[in-house]
Amino acid sequence: MPVAQDIQINRGPFGVFRFPTQVRRSNQHSSPESASSHRDDDVALVPDLASQDQLGDGGGRHSITQDGSTVPISEAQLPGKEQEPAALSITHVYSRLPSPLSDWYNTSEWWNMDELPDSESWWGESVSVNHIRDTPELQCQSSPPIQRPPNSITIPQDFEACPVAVSMDMQLQKQVIPADSSIPPKIDCNVPHDAVHLLKHYSSTVLRGLTPYRHSKTPWHILFIPFVKSCLAALTLGEEMDHASLTAFFGTLAVSASSLGCMSNSRKWTQQAETYKQQARHHVRLMLKTAYDVPKVSKYKSILMAILTMVQISSVSGTRDQTECYLLEAEKFIRVKGLNRRKSRKVRLLHHCYTFERLLHESTCPTITQSAHRLHVRRAIESSNASAYSLDSLSFRLTSCVNLDQQMQKFKDQQEGENDLHLQIPGIWLATLYPEIFGIPEIHLLLLSLVIRLERAKEDSEYSGAAGLKEFLGCAKAVEKGIHRLKRMSANVVVDASATTDKDCQRLLDNLAQAMQLAVAIYFYRTIYNVEPDMLQDKVRGVRDCLLRFEATESETGYGSARLLWPATIAAKEAEDLKVRRTFRRWFTDWGRRSGLRSFPDALEDVERAWEEKRGTDAVEATETSILPDQAV
């Protein structure tokens, strides 16, 4: 190009073009040799990948036809009669074109499960990229369709069939552009085909029963759901994952599939839940083998979430022996690896989840306090260097309850609040998270823990003597006063009542606190004093009324239904009136069907077993009563 040549650069819809005005002015007078020498500078190739149609000729001297021949083009046929674009590198053109999948594969939108289509259409169905592009709501809005001029250069799809010599840049681009853009019908992938559907059901249905709150700040929304989503993303991308992640992933799918199986009475989902459960059990065994290794294989939170997921699986599948096994493993892991560290809010959330499940398990399931597994866990904790950080007993032993009233009013420091794992130390901890997670004040769980310790102390020979019995009765009287004080004190959880949903939540929290207080009282009198069931019927009917109020306000949403399961079980076992029993039976059946959690029908089986045992005991007592007068005669 001559030095004195005038260069004009303009930006068009297809990129940046340069216009040599000197060449344009002298174009008609140039020789064939000069025209040939400038031919490459006068032709601009602008490929359209979206349509694979003809491309606009930027102002070259010839046009390529389908058979590969060239025909001359007059000045009048050029799209810009006054301007003739110069050469544009094909590599630059390709680099400016947006990816055809850039807008579709948007990870932020992909994780928005509220916008997912109906998963029933996903089964055994392949997805085509061309089909996705044609979908109106998924079309790329940034680049409108390109209108090609009447005389344009056509690049065939099969580059090798084109007899025209192409540049090296064009050949390199041909290697990276697939001939077929559709996804094959079957993808060799480890991602379960129903994973998204099950995760959506878990988030929208299962979690409702676990928390009374309608917001997304619970441990399940903050920790468990994002953790499982990241596992799904890693599996989709073919990344390597540790056993803790796979345990939580398949465990969550098992819980969700089990819920669907109970709700729809589908054998298919029940079998799928069992399959995912076995996969989770396989990975949790491998995880526990390396959970205490140094350097650590997995993160502390990941391992604890995996174990708690297995606790949830076993509780909803009816295998309570496995529930105790995983609870003991969680206790060992927390005491050995968790109490001697700085605890973030997320770690404390997980510790609270464990303690809550452990206390409910100890109070409802008959356990052998000296089982081999419990002894093994206790020895492992005691032999570790971190056993000194545990501020509570490893076996729910009863401690001194002298001046329990004053102890209940004192404030716990941070170490007492965080390292008193099973709530043995009386007092108030301002940083407790039980109200935020379960909607239940910590004092209810503290009194429940003390009742469990009193129950264990009844079987301890240490309290069989006169001095031990006096100490035991003193502790029992102090705990009884604490339970009755719950009626008078404002121990309910309070939420902001500015919105209608918050008002509904407040009614649910008040109802839940009342049911817990009555159930703790029933549990105390039956296990410690062994009073007659007739003396507890007022409290039993009080729990029944709480369940009826829950049905009246939460019949459609079902928030916090699982949190009422423990009070309902404790009260229903002591019910004697047939109408009250029918109410309890209907409540267990209905909410078991609505939530899909096996915990409800399993609890009903325990209740009916208790009713049957009581019926047998009453029959024996009636027989003995009828025989006594005859013996007297």
Image (cartoon, rainbow, N blue to C red):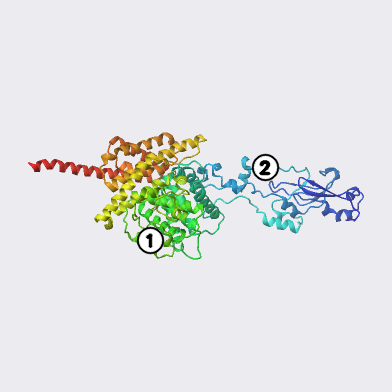
Residue type, mark 2 in image: Gln
Q: Specify the quadrant that holds the C terminus.
A: top left
Q: Is residue 142 left or right of residue 267?
A: right
**Sequence-wise, which precedes: disc 1 or disc 2?**
2
Residue 275: in sight, yes or no? no
Q: Position of residue 448 (x, y in %)?
A: 36, 48
Residue at numbered disc 2: 141
* Residue 335 drawn above or below residue 602: below
Q: Amino acid at mark 1?
A: Val
- Mark identifier at residue 513: none
Name the foreground residue: 568 vs 282: 568
Check disc 1: other Cα within 10 Å, few if <14, some if 14-19, many if 20+.
Answer: some
Label 2's element? loop
Quarter where residue 278 is shown: bottom left
Q: Position of residue 90 (x, y in %)?
A: 75, 54
Given residues 609 and 254, the one toward you in this image is: 609
Q: Residue at x 90, y 48 (%)?
A: 25
Tags 1 and 2 in contact by the CB under 8 Å rule? no
| Image disc number at residue 377 | 1
Residue 176 spot, x, y in % from top left: 67, 56
Please say if 381 is above or below 12: below
- 10 Å neighbourhood of mark 2: few (<14), some, or many (≥20)? few
Between 248 and 380, the one lying in front of the other is 380
